[in-house]
Amino acid sequence: MTPEEATKRKEEWVARMKQEGRMKENMTEDHKACLNALQNPVRRKILKALIGQKKSLDEIKTEFKLTDSQVSYNLNMLESTLCIEKEESEGVTYYILTPRGEGFVENVELKK
């Protein structure tokens, strides 16, 4: 993906999140919620595992050796903070990185 395509994707995603009312109006609260979610190392590892690919709940559960409740809790936390989103394909729900999730991985995790 070219930088121009990435910028366009991000702009479209932000507009869609605002339109759907999923992005908090108060950006300070939005950032606090995201930072809280990303303090957990398992959630950070999940984001890194989704770089350039989508994974199902079962794939994530198996890869990280999580229980049903643990995988659901962590994925819900990442989804509620707009770091990942669901994508349906052939009756299977997959999780993919959002532009916010990609930004975190690129600007924080990969620079360690």
Image: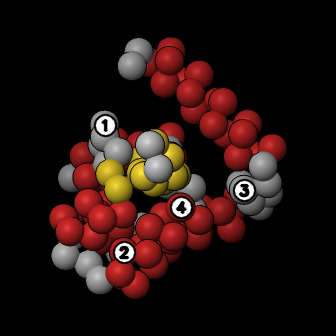
Q: Amino acid at mark 3?
A: Arg
The tag earlier along the polypeptide, 3 or 4, is 3
- Cα gap from disc 3 to disc 2, whole angstroms: 22 Å
Q: Which residue is mark 2?
A: 71
The tag earlier along the polypeptide, 2 or 1, is 1
Q: How is the image coloured?
A: secondary structure
The tag earlier along the polypeptide, 3 or 1, is 3
Q: Which residue is mark 1?
A: 52
Helix, strand or loop at mark 4: helix
Tell whether 8 sits left or right of 87.
Answer: right
* Residue contact between numbered discs 3 and 1, judged by CB atoms under 8 Å: no
Percent of width and height locating residue 16 = 72, 39
Between disc 2 and disc 4, the foreground one is 2
Q: Is residue 10 above or below residue 61?
A: above
- Cα gap from disc 1 to disc 4, whole angstroms: 17 Å
Q: Amino acid at mark 1?
A: Gly
Q: Amino acid at mark 2?
A: Val
Q: Residue at x 39, y 19 (%)?
A: 1
Q: Residue at x 27, y 70 (%)?
A: 61
